[in-house]
Image: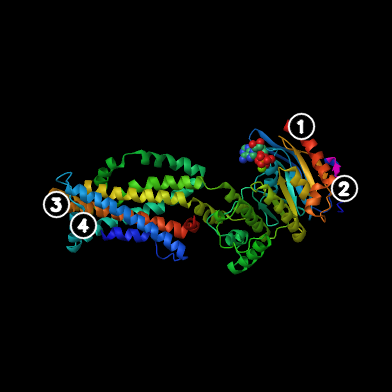
Amino acid sequence: MTVTALAADTFDPASVVTHDPVVRVEAICKHYGSTEALRNIDLQFERGKLTTLLGPSGCGKTTLLKIIAGLVPATSGQIVVNGRAVTGPGPERAFVFQDFALMPWATVLRNVGFGLELKGMAAAERNRIARRYIEEVGLQGFEDKYPHELSGGMRQRVGIARAFAVNADVLLLDEPFSAVDEQNRRKFQEDLLRLVEMERKTFIFVTHSIEEAVYVSDRIVLLSPRPGRVSNIIDPRIDRTANPDDIRRDPGYLDVVEEIWQGLRHYAE
Amino acid sequence: MSVMSQDVKVVAPAATTGQALRLFAERRRSFWVVLSLLVLFTAWEIAGRVPISFAFPTFLDTLAAFFEMVADGSMIRAFFLTLQPLVLGVAISALLGIALGIVMGLSDRLEWLLAPVFIVLQAAPMAALVPLVTFVYGIGLVAKTLAVIMLALPVIVLNSYKAVRHVNPSLVDMCRSFQGTRRQQIFKIIIPDASPVLFAGLRLGVAAGFIGVMLAELLITPTGIGDLITYHRSVANYAHMYAAVTAIIAASTVTLALLQWFETNVMRPEKRRS
Ligand SMILES: Nc1ncnc2c1ncn2[C@@H]1O[C@H](COP(=O)(O)OP(=O)(O)OP(=O)(O)O)[C@@H](O)[C@H]1O
Ligand SMILES: [Mg+2]
């Protein structure tokens, strides 16, 4: 067992260096009427890495992710993707929804190819691409099923395949596994790591689960509750070449989990 | 009652030849439909034989009267006259109603402008207003069509509007996140997602349209099926009168079943498998 998870690096948010940032969040504030959801968020997301937004319920994780996606307008501040300020959704970003957002009247094949369908790609071509990603997420054989015929976990695989199919640089995932039971969740996390490895894309991932965050992330951004602010940034530095079960038992991994828990604890009280 | 037996076939379409299992389930369903009709007709036959009223014919007498009226052409002529304003009125109400409902669902201003009108219209006892149409449009096809529209339109508009307002916002976000245009959003997401409630409204609208045309024929222009009912009642041909009444009920049932079939097979194919 050569698990070499180093103790995590914890940074003061202001002093973090990010090489080659693909997404820059600059001074984002968001108010919903009189509710202040986000205050002055500055973040950079490194190309090819998986960054997790972690924080208590209601701290504005979904809001921040949707602002990055261009689905929700910020009250002030800007989002820069690949060096250009963006104001709406764009082809370089794809979103995976917490509630899957699958069209119940469409088959798995059509749902996965829907992003391409909207771009006007011919049916034969988009079905070919859709089939490839259906296979990649392990759903071959289910192409002609409807969403209600699938389990929650399988539905989210469809949502992930759909986001991959448009070949965006940045994948935004809002608690993609929250509707999945614990056993499947672990399987999912491993699949996700495999996809991160294979696809060489940037992932911005939202979760409630500290263990999940530490297990899958290159970097964890801790948000404080209302109004959401960046309270801490942690690079877990887990050695992912090790066997998953060993990682989960590794003292280094457990220390990071504990450290984050201590950081979040006073919010829970 | 040939119309009724068609109904049964419509409910269980033989066209969806899937696996033997599905076919069996379909067959079983049509079996229950037939059984339910048999119970109804037997109860009717018994009630007619008791008899519960001298003006209440047996089922078999009514059936005989129906075939007699089909044979002498009076039933067919009557349907021809009744269906014209009905089809015209329902078609106009459906197209206009769904279009209006959708634009009201999409735009707050149009909602504020139009919703009160249709809420008042839906609340109004339309039967009382039907005779007024005669003053303006006489007793022709226009008056009957208007009566159908007056009853069918409000319910279609209000349901379509409600349907659009209840579209899953997450699906709309999904479409936007993949840079779908507004047009794609409306045709690929909003209308399909709204279609169950849209169709519920359409079914209510069609049923209301049948009421409208019967009111018109009973209250303003004695033509078509309404005239058949009035005439046979006046000469105490109760079996014939009931045949006409039952025929229009059957026509309405078949139409609604067809609409349901269209919805599950064309608009929302996943419903076939639930
Ligand atoms: N559309 C909205 N209108 C008004 N307030 C909103 C809206 N969306 C979110 N909020 C508020 O903004 C805050 C942040 O919400 P958000 O959904 O981003 O939190 P979250 O971190 O994703 O929470 P959870 O972990 O429960 O998903 C909450 O207080 C919420 O009530
Ligand atoms: Mg959320």
Evaluate whether residue B31 shows in this view.
yes
Q: Tell me the residue that label 4 is attached to.
A: B63
In the image: residue B99, left or right of residue A95: left
Ligand 1 lies in which image quarter?
A: top right
Q: Which residue is disc 1 drawn over? A: A266
Residue found at the far left of this picture: B235
Marks 3 and 4: same chain? yes
Q: Are marks 2 and 4 in contact (CB under 8 Å)?
A: no
Residue A194 drawn in magenta: no
Q: Which residue is the site of mark 3? A: B237
Furthest-front residue in view?
Answer: A1
Question: Looking at the image, is mark 3 or mark 2 nearer the viewer?
Answer: 2
User: Marks 4 and 1: same chain?
Assistant: no
Q: Amino acid at mark 3?
A: Asn
Residue picked out by circle 2: A6
Q: Chain of mark 3?
A: B
Q: Give the colour scheme of this rendering.
A: rainbow
- Which of the 4 image quadrants contains residue B28? bottom left
SS for dot 2? loop
Nearer the viewer's eye, disc 3 or disc 4?
A: 4
Front-most of residues B247 and B143: B247
Image x and y of residue A201, in percent? 75, 57
- Whether residue A11 appears in magenta in the rendering, the answer is yes
